[in-house]
Image (cartoon, rainbow, N blue to C red):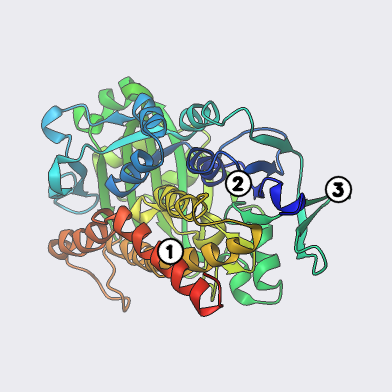
């Protein structure tokens, strides 16, 4: 055995968001011999956005990755204030018209799963604390190219500051505006860049006490107010002290022209977009001061998430609109499956990594791309639009949402990993590797 073969297998993780950090934690747990380095373009750990939620599929993945990861989520998770509402994902209510404020339906999960929301920043702090000491993290590292050195078989990553590094494999976890996606698919491929979904959203966290004063205690539980051309979503975070509010708006065909995808807005902007809505939505929106206005982008389906020993994970692979509340959760699903394919019994040498990446792509790409499509449909449903642009009867809302959310939540991730492992064996056999 050569000395080179005794060297630890090295993996460069590009991006230090939820996907990249969770993957590093998962890989460290399932294969401690791996040499892992996270490269982040920002100057430090940071998370954009206010609130995030994880469904039963995501918490299942957390438990399978590490009890510590599941516990980290539990420490910052805020459930509905009313115990009898614990299993309810959201109450859906009329936002406009004579029935404004009235309940349309409750969407719940099977098995009594307790839905929670949490602060993205708090969750990030929790998982950063779980990064093992032997995992290196380097900041201010903006990727400009990833290539394979044909002579050494190593992957070379080039950064904007002129730095070049080598690793046995590269995993792009660099988010919706991923440089790795452009490199892997080719800058000229229309699927390399995110596309505008035709909707934008105002986001802000308001004080829960003030929210209860103007809207009543129903806002202590997860609510969605629906209407034609918009929907208003809210859930408690920060131990019930804050109410995360997201006000979605259909742009009615108007393109997003600003280079920035998050721009400052005013209370007046929000109220203008929600003119004519009911008493409770209007009262809540009047609490918002200096909201951020977010353009909602997602990805067209990529033909592959991997080439050789280079692959994409999380939003870099399958960025989605937030209408399924599952984008971050699918990043955790990715980390669970990929880490389970990079264990010592599967990757005996760096050359084995490509088979694991191929199996990851084959299993994760169909599921994650379906989420993107389903989430777009949910966005239409929540704004009472049919898929062909007609008007949706509010009585049909619950059924459409339950189908898409049940599909996302009710999954056997252990069975998915077993299927992927079998695929690795077949891929190796096909290529004459035992």
Classed neighbour count for the residue bearing mark 2: other residues with Cα under 10 Å, few (<14), some (14–19), many (≥20): few
In the rendered view, tell whether residue 254 sits above or below residue 96.
below
- Residue at image mark 3: 163
Q: Which of pointers 2 and 1 indicates the residue nearer the eye?
A: 1
Q: Secondary structure at mark 3?
A: loop
Q: Whole-percent x and y of residue 301?
A: 49, 72
For marks 1 and 3, the one nearer the N-term is 3
**114 shown above or below 359:** above
In the image: residue 161, left or right of residue 388: right
Q: Nearer the viewer, residue 430 or 183?
A: 430
Question: Residue at the location (40% across, 44% down)?
Answer: 246
Near-viewer residue (277 or 221): 221
Q: Where residue 64 appears, x then y in whole percent?
A: 35, 42
Number of callouts: 3
Q: Which mark is residue 364?
A: 1
The residue that appears at 41% across and 41% down in the rendered structure is 65
Q: Can you give x and y, in whole percent of width and height, for residue 283 in the image? A: 31, 35
Callout 1: SS: helix
**Mark 2 = which residue?**
263
């Amino acid at each position: 055995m050569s000395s080179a073969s005794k060297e630890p297998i090295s993996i460069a993780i590009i991006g230090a968001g939820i996907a990249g950090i969770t993957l590093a934690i998962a890989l460290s747990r399932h294969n401690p011999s791996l040499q892992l380095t996270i490269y982040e373009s920002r100057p430090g750990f940071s998370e954009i956005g206010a609130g995030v939620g994880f469904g039963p599929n995501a918490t299942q993945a957390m438990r399978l990755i590490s009890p510590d990861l599941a516990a980290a989520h539990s420490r910052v998770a805020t459930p509905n204030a009313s115990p009898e509402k614990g299993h309810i994902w959201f109450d859906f209510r009329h936002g406009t018209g004579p029935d404004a404020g009235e309940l349309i339906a409750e969407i719940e999960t099977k098995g009594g799963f307790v839905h929670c929301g949490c602060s993205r920043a708090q969750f990030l702090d929790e998982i950063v604390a779980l990064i093992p000491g032997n995992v290196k993290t380097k900041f201010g590292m903006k990727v400009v190219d990833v290539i394979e050195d044909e002579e050494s078989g190593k992957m070379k990553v080039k950064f904007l500051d002129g730095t070049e590094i080598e690793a046995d494999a590269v995993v792009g976890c660099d988010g919706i505006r991923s440089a790795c996606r452009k490199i892997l698919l080719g800058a000229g491929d229309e699927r390399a860049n995110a596309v505008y979904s035709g909707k934008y959203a105002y986001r802000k966290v308001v004080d829960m006490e003030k929210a209860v004063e103007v809207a009543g205690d129903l806002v202590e539980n997860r609510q969605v107010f629906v209407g034609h051309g918009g929907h208003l979503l809210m859930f408690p975070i920060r131990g019930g002290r804050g109410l995360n509010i997201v006000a979605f708006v259909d742009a009615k065909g108007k393109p997003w022209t600003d280079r920035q995808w998050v721009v400052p807005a005013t209370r007046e902007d929000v109220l203008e977009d929600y003119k004519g809505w009911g008493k409770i939505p209007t009262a809540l929106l009047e609490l918002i001061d200096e909201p951020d206005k977010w353009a909602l982008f997602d990805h067209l389906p990529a033909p592959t998430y991997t080439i050789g020993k280079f692959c994409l994970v999380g939003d870099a692979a399958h960025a989605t609109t937030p209408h399924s509340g599952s984008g971050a959760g699918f990043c955790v699903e990715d980390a669970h499956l990929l880490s389970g394919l990079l264990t010592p019994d599967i990757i005996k040498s760096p050359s084995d990594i490509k088979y694991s990446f191929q199996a990851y792509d084959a299993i994760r790409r169909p599921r994650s791309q379906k989420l993107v499509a389903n989430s777009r449909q949910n966005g239409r449903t929540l704004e009472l639009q049919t898929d062909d642009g007609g008007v949706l009867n509010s009585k049909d809302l619950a059924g459409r949402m339950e189908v898409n959310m049940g599909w996302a939540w009710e999954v056997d991730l252990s069975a998915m990993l077993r299927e992927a492992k079998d695929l690795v064996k077949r891929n190796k056999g096909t290529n004459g590797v035992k």
